[in-house]
Amino acid sequence: MKQALISRSLGCRRTPQLEAAPLQIPAGREAVVILAYYFPPENAIGADRPFRFAKYLPRFGFVPRVIANNAEECREMDSVTRVPRRERHKPGLALAAGAARAVQKLLPYNEQLAWAPHAVAAGSRAIHKESAKLVLSTSPPLATHLAALRLKQRFGVRWIADFRDPLVGNPCRTRRFGKIYDSALERCIFSHADLLIANTESAAEAWRKRYPQWAGKIRTIWNGFDPEDAVRPSVIPRRPQALLAHVGSIYGLRDPRPVLWTIERSTALGLLNPGALQVLFAGPLEERIFSLTDPPFSTLAAKGCLRCDNRLLSRSDARRLIATADYLLLIDHASAETIHVPAKLFEYIQVGRPILALTSRNSPCDQILAKAGVPYKCMYMDASPEQACARLQEFLSLPNRAVPASRWFWEQFDGSRQTETLASLLRCLLAS
């Protein structure tokens, strides 16, 4: 029922007149319509992956036409259309957006559904103008895939669905009836998309087991980094305590308390001088999950070895902090079957200073760190208190000098190489 409501609310029959991107498609190149709700300069981690695709696709014979959310303070960019537009909409589009907004209220998660009709309208315009045969949608939010599905139904384009996070098995999607809802939508997307891209091999393998009938169209393109905008280590400033920094949001099943309890236990046992180390959480923390006024946050803060900067940092401030920290802290999802990789891991590894990772055994994070060539220690979530304390002591004995990452890391997660892989997949779709 909800799936049918979503499908009917995505677009009106007529396409509104939207302003065209100023660039023209060169002869011999193919246009790719990219539906990306988050896109720079919006300060969201989900904006980086579609930006890298759009930046490097022209090197491989494709011209991107990006359709993104019209967030505040987002400047206009060549080949990027921001929707919804600020001018008055045509009645049909306004009606479709209103219907989508009403359906959104019935859903267990905010899929940004009201954005989808505007994306469909802008995508229709781009397909007409550029004779585009390819549409790439990247989620979350799910509205990007639903808009792409509508465009495929309308124009018969080849559709590539890119998942930065999975639907089924996503530890942040745990509401009542959410599993049934996610399963239905995932099956709908998987059945209609021409290509399905996961950002970890663990996620791709889970899909192949769940949907063997569609295994042939499942591929992996990892998250990564822009080789032309790499994070480099900076000089560590003089300070009274060594700094162990977690830079970025903590939400969902990412729980830092096992690390903090280990630090608290180590100080109580005399294994760690609280005046020698300060843990910094720089980024929003979901206090509905854990309260900063309760132990171990409160007890460590009272000892002067914990500080929380509970706000969203600018990209430049976040990168500066990563580059100047003595040690870096990574908090993975607290799940026995973790298939995610926190995007900050790639920035941490570029800097090359010691990384303490709270993760599961043989998780994607565990496997990447084992081959990345930088100093690290994993504190596994099933470790006993004694094992965790021992691992913390091992970690703090590591020198804080920066170590260059391995050649494997620089090649495997280079955004330009990953986009080359995407371009190869696009060419195969066009030829099929």
Image: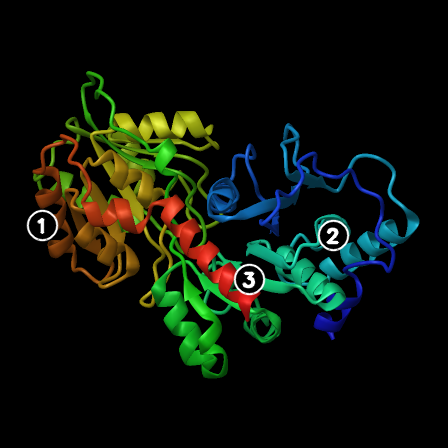
Q: Position of residue 358 (x, y in %)?
A: 26, 51
Left or right? Give the position of 30 relative to 360.
right
Q: Which residue is mark 3?
A: 161
Q: Which residue, as the protein is rendered here, is positioned at the far bottom?
A: 213
Amino acid at pointer 2: Ala
Q: Secondary structure at mark 1?
A: helix
Q: Which mark is residue 114?
A: 2
- Of 243 and 153, nearer the camera is 153
Measured Cα–Cα span from mark 2 to mark 1:
51 Å
Tell us which disc is closer to us: 2 or 1.
2
Q: Which residue is mark 1?
A: 390
- Of 72 and 40, nearer the camera is 40
The image quadrant that residue 348 belongs to is top left
Q: Secondary structure at mark 2?
A: helix
Tell us which disc is closer to us: 3 or 2.
3
Q: Is residue 203 above or below residue 271?
A: below
Q: Earlier in the sequence, mark 3 or mark 2?
A: 2
Which residue appears at 65% of the width and 59% of the height?
133
Q: Position of residue 176 (x, y in %)?
A: 58, 69
Left or right? Give the position of 383 relative to 12.
left
Does the image show residue 137? yes
Measured Cα–Cα span from mark 3 to mark 1:
44 Å
Q: Is residue 184 above or below residue 294?
A: below
Q: Is residue 76 above or below residue 263?
A: above
